[in-house]
């Protein structure tokens, strides 16, 4: 029963307001604090998000700028590629044109070379024909010398003849008359001059062909080794000097005739060397000319490189 309870155990009505006044403020503070905590978290999140957005926008702008630059570079490269392709096509066309022209030139060169070989062959055949005719006009032979008395040991047993006239090794020998020596030397001069003309080989020293009164010209301004006594004693300073190629006792100086023969032999040696004919300096001048004609006529001339094609 309530009436039986002691009075001390019963709560007093005067203490309840103070407890409520203490409990309610604390509850309100807790609620306020709980409300303030989410607000602060939201502000921090918002700040972080805004910073992230700004950073992202900056990165996006930078990427857009890089993409634009790459597009510009790509367009420039494309323009260069187009321009290079145009130049390359133009170059290829030019090369093709040059190749076609080169082929045409090679064909024309081949045709010209064939024509040249045939012309050389015909020319050489014509030369051989002329030399054969010349060989008939001025036949060169090696004949035996017949003597009645006992000749000396050094007397030659053979001698060369041109057109039937002997041309001894020693043109000053008394065994042959002046007219015979002069005529044979005149034949030899004509023979050398015609061979030079037919073979298109210029002579080193010009020959004056007047049969038994032939001569040879020497340029005194050109020095020559050996046999200088006649040239230095009788030639003026500069100009052409005429040396006889005939013998006439009492009228022709012996040294001048010898020097003229030296010049004539040099002409013959020039002909043989030009056509690649091997010879010896000690051979008779007619033997050298005979060797030249035989090698050209028989087709053993190494200097002729023509082909009939």
Image (cartoon, helix red, strand yellow):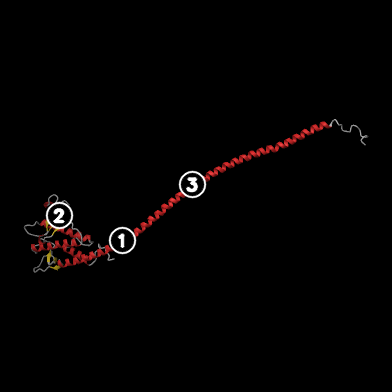
Q: Is residue 23 above or below residue 249?
A: above
Any mark on residue 88, and which?
none
Q: Which residue is mark 1?
A: 108
Q: Nearer the viewer, residue 78 or 240?
A: 78
Toward which corner of the image does residue 260 lie, by quadrant?
bottom left
Task: Say which residue appears at 54% left-offset and 42% top-offset.
Answer: 62
Drawn side of residue 206 relative to residue 72, left or right: left
Query: Which element is circle 2 on?
Result: strand
The foreground one among 12 and 238 is 12
Residue 16: x and y in percent read 84, 32
User: What is the quadrant of the N terminus in the image?
Assistant: top right
Q: Where is 170 relative to 86, above or below?
A: below
Res. 91 image quadrant: bottom left
The mark closer to the camera, 2 or 3, is 3
| N-term mark: 2 or 3 | 3
- Among the two numbered marks 2 and 1 on one chain, the one whose residue lies closer to the N terminus: 1
Across and down, in percent, residue 199 comes to 20, 62
Q: Are marks 3 and 1 in contact (CB under 8 Å)?
A: no
Find residue 179 and report its horizontal and vertical position in percent. 8, 63
3D distance between C-alphas at marks 2 and 1: 46 Å
Q: Which residue is tagged 3?
A: 73
Contact between marks 2 and 3 (CB within 8 A): the answer is no
> Pointer 3: residues within 10 angstroms few (<14), some, or many (20+)?
few
Task: Tell me the residue that label 2 is attached to.
Answer: 218
Query: For the point 43% across and 51% down, which residue is it?
Result: 84
**Which type of secondary structure does the marked residue at label 1 adopt?**
helix
Mark nearer the viewer, 3 or 1 = 3
Q: Secondary structure at mark 3?
A: helix
């Amino acid at each position: 029963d309530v009436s039986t309870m002691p009075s001390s155990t019963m709560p007093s009505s005067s203490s309840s307001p103070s407890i409520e006044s203490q409990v309610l403020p604390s509850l309100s503070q807790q609620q306020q604090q709980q409300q303030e905590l989410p607000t602060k978290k939201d502000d921090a999140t918002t700040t972080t998000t805004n910073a992230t957005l700004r950073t992202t926008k900056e990165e996006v702008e930078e990427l857009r700028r890089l993409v634009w630059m790459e597009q510009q570079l790509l367009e420039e490269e494309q323009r260069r590629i187009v321009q290079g392709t145009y130049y390359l096509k133009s170059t290829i066309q030019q090369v093709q044109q040059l190749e076609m022209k080169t082929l045409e030139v090679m064909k024309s060169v081949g045709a010209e070379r064939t024509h040249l070989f045939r012309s050389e062959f015909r020319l050489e055949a014509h030369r051989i024909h002329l030399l054969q005719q010349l060989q008939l006009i001025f036949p060169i032979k090696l004949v035996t010398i017949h003597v009645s008395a006992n000749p000396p040991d050094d007397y030659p047993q053979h001698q060369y003849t041109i057109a039937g006239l002997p041309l001894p090794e020693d043109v000053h020998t008394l065994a042959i008359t002046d007219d015979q020596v002069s005529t044979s030397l005149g034949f030899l001069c004509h023979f050398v001059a015609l061979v030079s003309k037919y073979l298109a080989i210029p002579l080193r020293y010009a020959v004056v062909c007047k049969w038994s009164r032939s001569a040879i010209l020497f340029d005194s301004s050109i020095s020559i080794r050996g046999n200088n006594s006649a040239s230095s004693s009788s030639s003026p300073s500069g100009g052409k000097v005429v040396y006889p190629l005939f013998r006439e006792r009492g009228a022709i100086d012996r040294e001048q005739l010898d020097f003229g023969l030296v010049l004539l032999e040099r002409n013959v040696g020039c002909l043989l060397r030009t056509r690649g004919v091997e010879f010896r300096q000690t051979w008779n001048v007619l033997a050298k000319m005979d060797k030249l004609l035989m090698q050209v006529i028989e087709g053993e001339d190494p200097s002729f490189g023509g082909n009939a094609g």
